Image (spheres, helix red, strand yellow):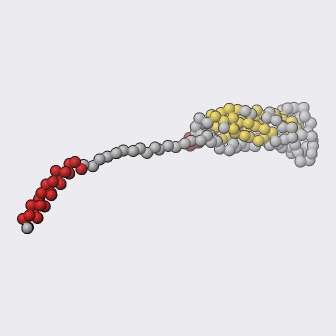
Amino acid sequence: MKKFLLLTAIACTASLAAVAPAMAQSTTTGTITVGAGTAALCTAPTAVSVALGNYNGTGVATGSTDVTFRCTATTPATVTLLSASAGGTTTGGKLSSPAGTTPINYTFTGNNTPVTGTGLSAGQDITVPVGVNVAAGQNPAPATYEDTINVTVTY
């Protein structure tokens, strides 16, 4: 009986060895898609205030500042300037005083300037120069006069 079991075990091992190559592992493949999206983005514009000094009406008062911001690479943007004063436009406005005196008219340049982004991570500002001009010939009463120019970056 022991001999029979031993011969049976040897026979089974031999038949498994003969079948093993037929039971080799198979493979199959798949894919993983990796993607990222980008979006056009610009930071909020900043600028330093323009101080025109003392204006007495006999001469021209001029000043300038730079509007700076950053946009993602190749993002087209346009800077729009708009005076906040009553009757203000995209090219000029009125400097007014809290005392209610007659306003001082002024003009500005730099409106509707098209620019292209260089990349937020590149650390490069986009700079748009803004010029302000008060023409001679106005006769304002002594006071402090101000206006606000709203800056919009459209992208």
Hey, which residue is sitting farthest bottom in the picture? 1
For the C terminus, the quadrant is top right
Residue depicted at x 64% and y 34% = 76
Q: Position of residue 142 (x, y in %)?
A: 91, 43
Q: Viewed as shown, does residue 89 lie left or right of 68?
A: right
Query: Where residue 80 sits in the image (x, y, percent)?
Result: 73, 36
Indicate the quadrant where residue 57 lies.
Answer: top right
Instruction: Between residue 75 and residue 98, name the one nearer to us.
Output: 75
Query: Residue 30 at x, y = what percent?
Result: 39, 44
Left or right of 118 on screen, residue 17: left
- Report the side of 80 relative to 8 (left or right): right
Question: Which residue is painted at 92% across and 40% down in the image?
Answer: 102
| 107 lies above or below 147 | above
User: Which of 77/67 is in front?
Assistant: 77
Q: Which picture quadrant has residue 58?
A: top right
Q: How many marks?
A: 0
Rendered image quadrant of residue 137: top right
Q: Viewer-proximal residue, 47 or 1?
A: 1
Residue at the far left: name it: 3
Image quarter (top left, top right, bottom left or bottom right) of the N terminus: bottom left
Tell me which residue sits at (93%, 43%) in the image: 101
Residue 36 percent location from the top left of the image? 52, 43
Residue 133 in view: no
Is residue 115 at least partly visible in the picture? yes
Front-most of residues 96 and 139: 96
